[in-house]
Image (spheres, rainbow, N blue to C red):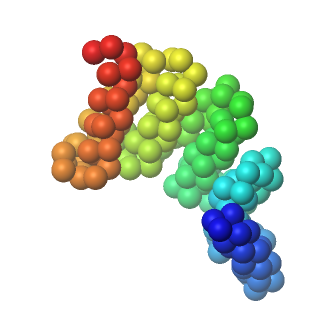
Amino acid sequence: GGEGRLKQARQCEEAVVAGRRALYGAAHPDPLKALGKLAVSTGQLGDLAAARRLQEEVVAGLRALHGDAARDTLRAVNNLAGTVAALGDAFEAHAMLEDTIATLARVFGADDGDTLTARGNLAALLWQYGEREEAFALQEQVAGGLRRTRGADDPAARNAETVLDSMLRELGF
């Protein structure tokens, strides 16, 4: 079944990480990218604590290579925040996302795709924890940014609008 294939994928990814570390060393983008993929499959298999440790290693490696404000570093922090939230630490995830959004917006712009993705993740987190008005306002920013940058017919823009409509219905409008 699906879990068996995920376990096979994880084993393959572990071998890829080991091979890339042997070839390039641990402080190189290729093994870090492979480690990020390993973290995803580890999380999908339900071991969120191990996934978090792997993601923290990726973030630390990317910070050492590229700095705190590099796109790859910020994407990795965004992914880590999702795992932290899934582990039940909404406060830490919220802080991570706020910092990531502020840096992304400052460096790449408020309507940058990664900024909008992180903002959408924060909206989902806030919604999940009952901060409905703030979540809705953030989702409006995401939908508006995607409409401006990609057009109303773009699948991501339409998805953001669908989420916004769903939020409106749940709010009773």
Split into 4 quadrants, where in the image is the C terminus?
top left
> Looking at the image, is 141 positioned above or below residue 137?
below
> Looking at the image, is 13 positioned above or below residue 103?
below
Residue 123 x, y percent position in the rendering? 47, 30
Residue 67 x, y percent position in the rendering? 63, 54
State the residue lying farthest toward the front. Answer: 1
Can residue 13 be seen here? The reply is: no
Split into 4 quadrants, where in the image is the N terminus?
bottom right
Identify the residue at image location x=66%, y=55%: 44
**117 on left or right of 159:** right
**109 on left or right of 98:** left
Identify the residue at image location x=58%, y=45%: 78
Can residue 33 be seen here? The reply is: yes
State the residue lying farthest toward the bottom. Answer: 23
**115 on left or right of 89:** left
**Which quadrant of the view contains residue 12?**
bottom right
Identify the residue at image location x=61%, y=29%: 94
Residue 72 x, y percent position in the rendering? 56, 58
Residue 32 x, y percent position in the rendering? 69, 67
Total marks placed: 0
Pick the residue in front: 52 or 158.
Answer: 158
> Looking at the image, is 36 positioned above or below residue 50?
below
Identify the residue at image location x=32%, y=44%: 159
**Which quadrant of the view contains residue 135?**
top left
